[in-house]
Image (cartoon, rainbow, N blue to C red):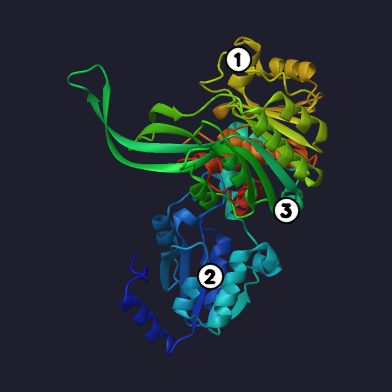
Amino acid sequence: MDKYIDLSLKKNITKIRNISKTNTIIHCHGVFDLLHIGHIKYFEEAKSLGDILFVSITSDKFVNKGTGRPFFNQKLRCEAVSALKCVDFVTINNHENSSDLIKLMKPNIYVKGPDYQFIKDKDDKNLLLEKKAAKSVNASIRYTSGKIHSSSNLLNKNMNIFNEEQIKFISSLKKRTSFQKIKQSIDSLVNKKIMIIGETILDRYIFCDVIGKSGKEPMLVNHQLDANIFVGGILSVSNNISNFCDKIQAVTYLGNEKNNKLKFIKSKIGKNVKLNYVEKSNSPTIMKTRLVDKYTNNKLSGLYKINNDMISSKEESKIIKMIDTHIKKIDIVIIVDYSHGMLSDKIIKLLISKSKYLAVNSQLNAFNTNYYDISRYRNIDYLCIQEGELRNYFKDKKNSVNFLIKKLYKSQKIKKITVTMGKNGVLSYDGKNIYFCPAFAKNVIDRIGAGDTILAVTSMLNSLNLEQESVLFTGSLAARETVQTLGTGNILNKKNIIRSIEYSLK
């Protein structure tokens, strides 16, 4: 690949600068995942504008075009582009956009494809940054005039990006709605005011190397390598939402111990998340520690630091006051009930009676296995639970999820119910129809938090009465983003979700 140039080396920058003194440098940038006739015409037209055509390729880690992308890794994409006669130099760009590279290269002309001239700056921040960078080095911006082709469309149809179940679902979805309609719904969430109520949980991962059985005792020995703490519980849900809307109220409790991690928590939540909390007496801030095998990311065991008793009547009153202070201005209330002593009957009744739109997730865990109960949540707008929670509630492992979701709907009088089923996808029921969306996650690194993500996204979109398959599809793509990173509390990237939807529907 003699056309490849590593711009991290000063001598290569000098080489390009010397060439530019006597030649017109043309710069093109993109993913170029599946090289097709549209790309070739684009490069040829760009080259006709000057002397030297320089192409930068987005590195693998910054390609956010949905499931299975990039199909070809950065090395293969470089080789494909290098094979074109009209291309003089190729490099890999290790940034989200090419603005830094434009400033470094100082091309005479920066060239984009014909579809980019119709994109507004407010809709593509990366394009805006590239335009500003081009202007700063006096580079003109040109758009080619050829026919628009789509690598995503070709890959989706011909390269087994999706399995048969996913293809069938997407094909059906495209007949019912459009990318623009889904995007408009997601964008409309920006002005929604949301309150999230439930326990704060800190997830501590201790990464280990498994040594083996102790020589003297019947126990497994692990060698601790390093550790990390992530924000979980309702703070994870708050972070999932923080990129979608401007104002979030989180109502929770922390421990009353001297080190209740308040400073750490505030540093890890979205800037638009307002933390409202009480200090629970005789309690730590909940810390769930998991021993994790460093090389497989498999969880070996857990150790929980927690006071699982109910909050006191005084603490309950403080939480009720927090709710009353804000709830009239709140559009969507989301309860995440981890059953660790915060959500009393009185608080739940208040939320059911005063919420404009109430979504609930009631979680099954090691502490409440024997008394898991959804019956407190009647006449609510939306319930999102996992299949195991549904089966535990009815003590039923034989009947289908379709049967049980209808049974729950009838008994609880909930307007809409969603049941997540892991790799088997997600189901929803509204009293008339059952809707299904397959799972889209492939590279699963950590499943913890996937349900919280689906809850967060589907709660917001269901409040808009968006077509249900679109809601489930968006939630599934969001969950895919979550399971690809280790730990909880990562801020869900709205832009990545929207791009995943766009490229999946091409």
Q: For the residue carrying disc 3, how many other residues have a C-alpha within 10 Å: few (<14), some (14-19), or many (20+)?
A: some
Is residue 86 in sight in this rendering? no
In this view, the residue farthest toward the bottom is 22
In three-dimensional space, the C-alpha distance between marks 3 and 1, rounded to whole angstroms, equals 38 Å
For the point 79% across and 37% down, which residue is it?
A: 357
Determine the CA span between mark 3 and mark 2: 38 Å
| Residue 43: assigned label | 2
* SS at badge 3: helix
Residue 190, label in figure:
3
Mark 3 or mark 2, whichever is nearer to me: 3
Q: Is 213 rendered above or below residue 437? A: above
When the figure is inspected, residue 402 is found, relative to residue 348, above or below; the finding is above
Which element type, helix, strand or loop, lies under badge 1? Answer: loop
Who comes first in sequence, dot 3 or dot 1?
Answer: 3
Residues under numbered marks 3 and 2 in contact, where contact means CB atoms less than 8 Å apart: no
Location of residue 450 in the rendering, given as x and y in whole percent from the top left corner: 56, 35
Residue 371's tag is 1
Q: Is residue 224 left or right of residue 465?
A: left
Q: Name the amino acid type tagged 3.
A: Val
Q: Earlier in the sequence, mark 3 or mark 2?
A: 2
Quadrant assignment, res 452: top right
